[in-house]
Image (cartoon, grey):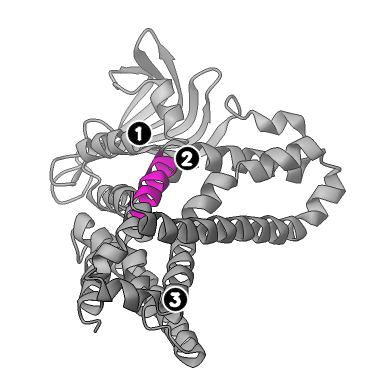
Amino acid sequence: MRILERYILKSVVSVFLLCLTVFICLYVIIDLFSNIGDILTQNSSFQIILRYYLSYLPIIFTQVSPICCLLATLYAFGGLNRDNEIIAMRSAGLSVIQIAKAVIIFGAIVSTLVFLVTDRFVPQSLALNLRIKEQIESGKQSSMDKRNAPINNLCMYGMRNRLFFISKFSPATGIMEGITILEHDNHQNLTKKIVANRGEHLDGLWYFQQVITYNFGLDGQTKGEPRYLEEEIMAIPESPKQFLAHRQRPDHMTIVQLDEYIWKLSKSGATSVVKNLKVDLWQRFTAPLTSFIIIFLGIPFALRMRKRATGLSSLGLSIMVGFLYYVLNSVSVAFGYAGYLPPLLATSLSHIIAFSVSLYLIYSLP
């Protein structure tokens, strides 16, 4: 790495780390004051509070990294431009991309870190943070482990186009209560409705008690008389562990887990749910690119910072552009959820537009 690149990179990295530290401190202070009532009421220990905020660190890092990259780029290149160092570099035959090469590589590294943290640490951090918050609010140590606690109102899309509604599910015993199963054909037409009072998993089979089965025709009307059985054995491929796994929220899943969950739901024909989850999945890949692309957005505005008034206007304009970037991303993702855009395009459209605009502004610099 050349001396010039190290000089620029040192300035950018130092400002980035400073901004990251400031944002983390502000986040913790604001959240601490908002929860101070529960903490004092429940007399929470220092260890619990420390674990609570340590679990927040991966989440904060992924959320504030883009704005830290933007501010670091504005500060570093704005300072170089005010001191006429950019003019000297351009006079030596360097292009803007060559000058910003080290910073662009830094943005790529930050985006990679955000991707890894988002996939490896954020899902666990969200789940841990939720459990600790419940403990702080309730003041009970037992609330830390709720794996064996009964789950109420469980909904699951299963194999063979089955949709399960379960009033109560006990993970410790694998027993269900208040069961409703809707079976559909490949065109999402309801073919059968099964209502059972209780279900238990034994030797790979489900034993249901007090079962009423309704059959439906293509017109959606019941076909024949309902069939009642005191006990019925059903070959449902899902095990209690798979039902328990569906307690996990999609944002608490890794990319691999979410992809597997989508695959299972696609077998059930739940097209609208699958569509929304595919948008969430592609966001896991495209959202980390924000740190990389927002550096490109900051470069052309930072290079216009010569006088104080010009610098302030460029700073305000770049922040406005960054805000519009996030608005555009929210709108495109909303179109993806609504089905107007394919999931991949919905999650990457804002990045494509922002990157194109930034390249245009960079190459239009004098």
The mark nearer the N terminus, 3 or 2, is 3
| Residue at point 13%, 41% (across, down) | 186
Please tell me in which quadrant of the rendered image residue 291 appears. bottom left
Q: In the image, residue 72 lies at what x, y percent? A: 47, 65
Residue of label 1: 257
Residue of label 3: 78
Q: Disc 1 and disc 3: Cα gap in Å? A: 43 Å
Q: In the image, residue 245 lies at what x, y percent? A: 43, 30
Q: Secondary structure at mark 2?
A: helix
Q: Disc 3 and disc 2: Cα gap in Å? A: 37 Å
The mark nearer the N terminus, 1 or 2, is 2
Name the residue type under label 3: Gly
**Cβ–Cβ under 8 Å for marks 1 and 2:** yes
Name the residue type under label 2: Pro
In the displayed image of the protein, which residue is found farthest to the top? Answer: 203
Give the camera-side residue of 71 and 33: 71
Please tell me in which quadrant of the rendered image residue 8 appears. bottom left
User: What label sits on residue 123 in the rendered view?
Assistant: 2
Query: Quick check: 137 left or right of 146?
Result: right
